[in-house]
Image (spheres, rainbow, N blue to C red):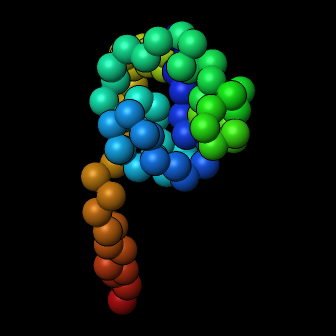
C-alpha cells in the first residue's frame, strides 16, 4: 500500500492544515486526486518544493502464539538458605 508523509513543514492551501515533517498526508485519510499527489511529490506546486514523499507501508508480521512456552519466574527476590552448623 502506498502512503505519503510530509517531506518538510508546510501549510496545505486547500484545507489550511499545517503539516510537519514525517506527518502522514493527508492527515485525515481522505482520498486525494492523483494529479495533486504528483504535484506535491514532484515540486510542481505553488511553492515549487517537494512537499510530500511516498513510503511503502508493510503489514506487520503476525506473531504466532507461543504454545507450551516455559513461564518466566515471578521476578521476586530469592532469599539465601540459613546455614546450620552441627556441634
- The reply, left or right, for residue 63 in relation to residue 45 is left
The image shows residue 67, relative to residue 15, as above or below, that is above
Where is 4 relative to 8, above or below?
Answer: above
For the point 70% across and 32% down, the residue is 43
x and y percentages locating residue 50 in the rendered image: 68, 37
Residue appearing at x 55%, y 40% in the figure: 6
Nearer to the camera, 57 or 10: 10
| Residue 40 at least partly seen | yes
Between 41 and 58, which is closer to the camera in this rendering?
A: 41
Count every numbered label the image shows and give the total: 0
In which quadrant of the rendered view does residue 26 lie?
A: top left
Above or below residue 74? Residue 71 is above
Identify the image quadrant of residue 68: top left
Along the line of sight, the residue nearer the viewer: 86 or 70: 70
The vertical placement of 33 against 26, above or below, is above
Residue in view at x 46 percent, y 35 percent:
24
Q: Is residue 55 visible?
A: no
- Residue 20 at x, y percent in the picture: 49, 51
Going by the picture, which residue comes out furthest to the bottom? 87
71 left or right of 2 in image: left
- Quarter occupied by the C terminus: bottom left
Instruction: List x then y, in percent, for residue 18.
Output: 41, 49
Amino acid at each position: 500500500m502506498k502512503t505519503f508523509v510530509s517531506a518538510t513543514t508546510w501549510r496545505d492551501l486547500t484545507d489550511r492544515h499545517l503539516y510537519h515533517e514525517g506527518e502522514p498526508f493527508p492527515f485525515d485519510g481522505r482520498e486525494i486526486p492523483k494529479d495533486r499527489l504528483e504535484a506535491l511529490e514532484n515540486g510542481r506546486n505553488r511553492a515549487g518544493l517537494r512537499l510530500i514523499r511516498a513510503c511503502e507501508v508493510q503489514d506487520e508480521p503476525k506473531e504466532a502464539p507461543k504454545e507450551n512456552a516455559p513461564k518466566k519466574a515471578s521476578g521476586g527476590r530469592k532469599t539465601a538458605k540459613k546455614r546450620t552448623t552441627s556441634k
